[in-house]
């Protein structure tokens, strides 16, 4: 469970004790029977290499070290910022249908992740799943916007930026969504479903939202309040399809 102390910026705010986020990604690709996958923020290709279905990957500066093609029937790589990708390309057309699963791990600024969510949702079905990485930071010192990694010995050089704010935004402005906060090490994994590809709420209010959540001096206190208010979902719900369906059904 989250703790509520910020006596020091490296105080551990939350303990993620479930399966790691990559294992969860693989499990969710199986539980959703994903045939079409989108990934934003691929970098070395580790996460992309674990997916077997037709995929679209977007990253402005690839540093591929893994076999990202593997057994995929198709694998499209786009080396450009995600905003440019969505302005020029249609992932649904590339993959031959709506997305089943998306993994968003791009620029670690809340407004960038929010744009990625908006653009991705347009290519989803209601039962598709959007995953957001790094949104449940275990320490405050890794949430800066400048790219400075954590000094905590347990999380050396980890940097999440302030993408945790995107979860707060979705909770506040899109109560129709179903949001699950998984205790996946090292920085949590957030699953969003119950999607509405026709919704324009976030896009229409983008300027208002960005201003509301703009960086402020009290961000550490706001982070503390957020982490103290949330309830983590156990990654045990991703063990099999029965558990996953029970979670979706609210059981």
Image (cartoon, rainbow, N blue to C red):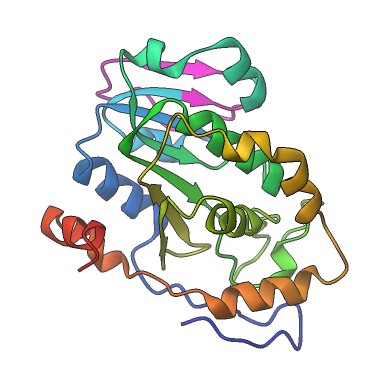
Q: How far across and how far down the image is residue 145, in percent?
A: 78, 53
Describe residue 112's horizontal placement relative to residue 137 as left or right. right
- Between residue 246 and residue 157, name the one nearer to us: 246
Describe residue 99's horizontal placement relative to residue 219 as left or right. left
Considering the image in quadrants, where does the C terminus appear? bottom left
Q: Give the range drawn in magenta.
A: 57-79
Residue 43 visible in this rendered orientation of the protein: no
Describe residue 44's horizontal placement relative to residue 100 as left or right. right
Q: Which residue lies furthest to the left in this view?
A: 242
Q: Decide: is 101 above or below 178.
A: above
Q: Which residue does the image show at 31% across and 12% down from the upper left?
A: 96
- Between residue 119 and residue 69, name the one nearer to us: 119
Is residue 115 magenta-colored?
A: no
Q: How far across and how far down the image is residue 202, in percent?
A: 61, 40
- Between residue 143 and residue 151, name the one nearer to us: 143
Give residue 114's quadrant in the image.
top right
Q: How far across and how far down the image is residue 48, in percent?
A: 41, 34
Q: Which residue does the image show at 24% across and 23% down from the upper left?
A: 71
Is residue 70 magenta-colored?
A: yes
Magenta stretch secondary structure, dominant: loop
Q: How far across and how far down the image is residue 72, in percent?
A: 28, 22
Q: Which residue does the image show at 33% across and 64% down from the upper left?
A: 19
Give residue 21's quadrant in the image.
bottom left
Residue 20 visible in this rendered orientation of the protein: yes
Q: Which residue lies furthest to the right in this view?
A: 217
Q: Decide: is 157 above or below 77.
A: below
């Amino acid at each position: 469970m989250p703790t509520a102390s910020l006596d020091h910026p490296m105080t551990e705010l939350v303990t993620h004790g479930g399966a790691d986020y990559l294992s969860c990604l693989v499990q969710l690709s199986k539980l959703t029977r994903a045939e079409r996958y989108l990934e934003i923020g691929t970098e070395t290709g580790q996460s992309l290499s674990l997916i077997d279905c037709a995929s679209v990957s977007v990253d402005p500066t690839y540093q591929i070290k893994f076999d990202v093609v593997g057994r995929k029937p198709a694998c499209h790589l786009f080396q450009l910022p995600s905003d440019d990708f969505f302005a020029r390309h249609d992932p649904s057309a590339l993959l031959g249908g709506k997305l089943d699963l998306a993994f968003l791990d791009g620029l670690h600024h809340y407004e960038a992740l929010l744009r990625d969510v908006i653009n991705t949702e347009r290519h989803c079905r209601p039962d598709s799943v959007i995953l957001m990485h790094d949104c449940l930071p275990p320490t405050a010192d890794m949430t800066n916007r400048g790219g400075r990694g954590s000094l905590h010995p347990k999380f050396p050089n980890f940097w999440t930026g302030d993408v945790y704010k995107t979860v707060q935004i979705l909770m506040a402005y899109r109560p129709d969504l179903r949001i699950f906060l998984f205790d996946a090490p090292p920085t949590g994994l957030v699953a969003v479903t119950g999607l509405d590809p026709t919704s324009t709420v976030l896009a229409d209010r983008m300027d208002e939202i960005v201003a509301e959540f703009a960086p402020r001096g009290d961000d550490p206190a706001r982070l503390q309040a957020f982490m103290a208010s949330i309830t983590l979902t156990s990654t045990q719900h991703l063990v099999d399809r029965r558990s996953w369906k029970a979670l979706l059904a609210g059981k």
